[in-house]
Image: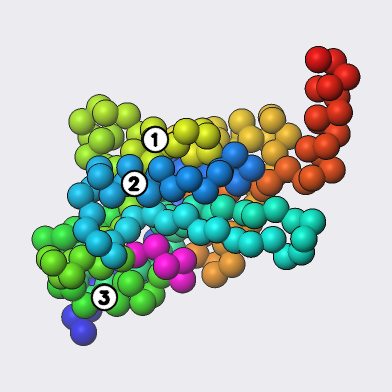
Amino acid sequence: MVDNPAADKPLQEPGPEPLVLLIDLERCTGCRACEAACKLENRLGEGMFRNRVFWMPPEDSNGRFEFVVAVCQQCVRPACLRACGAAAISKDPVTGVVEIDSDHCTGCQECVLACPYGAVSFDYRRHKAEKCNLCADRRATGRGGPACAAACPGRAIAFGPRSALIERAHDDGRHVRNVDRFGLGASTVYLERTPPSAVRATGERDDATG
């Protein structure tokens, strides 16, 4: 395997305002509109993805289904970058976005295997790895943020500076789920679902004031 010069450099925290997605697990209905929008925007073929929605069944009869949007975590210390022997993966020092340069990708699929979140897919037509880059083309051409966020009918996906998204969530009394189980500095923000007791209490208050 060819040495990756980028992997030898110390990875630093991105700039003061890294760009990320925020996934609200309470608002997601599992409709997969984000999947469809991503495939259309990036012209992804069969078996290719840059995001996926998983339906997680409840643990018991009193539980609720949970719908989880799996997408690149834009890690501070990306496993995919360190695994790439072609120096085809880089992390923007300002936005924090991890991106694959398809011109340099050799199709070895080491990044696919290295990502513990399963967020890297493979284009067997072009023999190139595929992953979310937060719709770099849309951002570069002034067409707004990622297509998934624009298409979500339940407004479960937001896009913006990480600190601002977390601050807004805290102001709304929401809790952030820790998904950094692998010590890679996962940056995508997931908001915990509202406990059923809180939902019932809110409903009772709404009924009383309605």
The quadrant of the image that shows the N terminus is bottom left
Residue at 69% across, 61% down: 58
The amino acid at mark 2 is Ala
The quadrant of the image that shows the C terminus is top right
Residue 129 on the magenta segment: no
Q: Nearer the viewer, residue 15 or 127?
A: 127
Secondary structure of residue under mark 2? helix
Residue at which label 3 appears: 109
Q: Is residue 13 left or right of residue 130?
A: right
- Residue 112 is drawn in which quadrant? bottom left
Q: Is residue 202 left or right of residue 130?
A: right
Residue at 62% across, 54% down: 66
Label 3–label 2 contact, CB within 8 A:
no
Extent of the magenta region: 116-120
Q: Earlier in the sequence, mark 3 or mark 2?
A: 2
Q: Residues within 10 Å of mark 1 (few under 14, many from 20)?
A: some
Q: Is residue 131 above or below residue 161?
A: below
Secondary structure of residue under mark 3? loop
The amino acid at mark 1 is Ala
- Distance between the alpha carbons at the discs numbered 3 and 2: 24 Å
- Distance between the alpha carbons at the discs numbered 2 and 1: 9 Å
**Residue 151: which numbered mark, if any?**
1
Label 2–label 1 contact, CB within 8 A:
yes
Q: Residue furthest front?
A: 61
Give coordinates of residue 23: x percent, y percent. Answer: 53, 44
Give coordinates of residue 73: x percent, y percent. Answer: 45, 56
Q: Is residue 146 above or below residue 9?
A: above
Q: Is residue 209 left or right of residue 10?
A: right
Q: Residue furthest top?
A: 210
Secondary structure of residue under mark 1? helix
Residue at which label 2 appears: 36
Q: Is residue 65 left or right of residue 158?
A: right
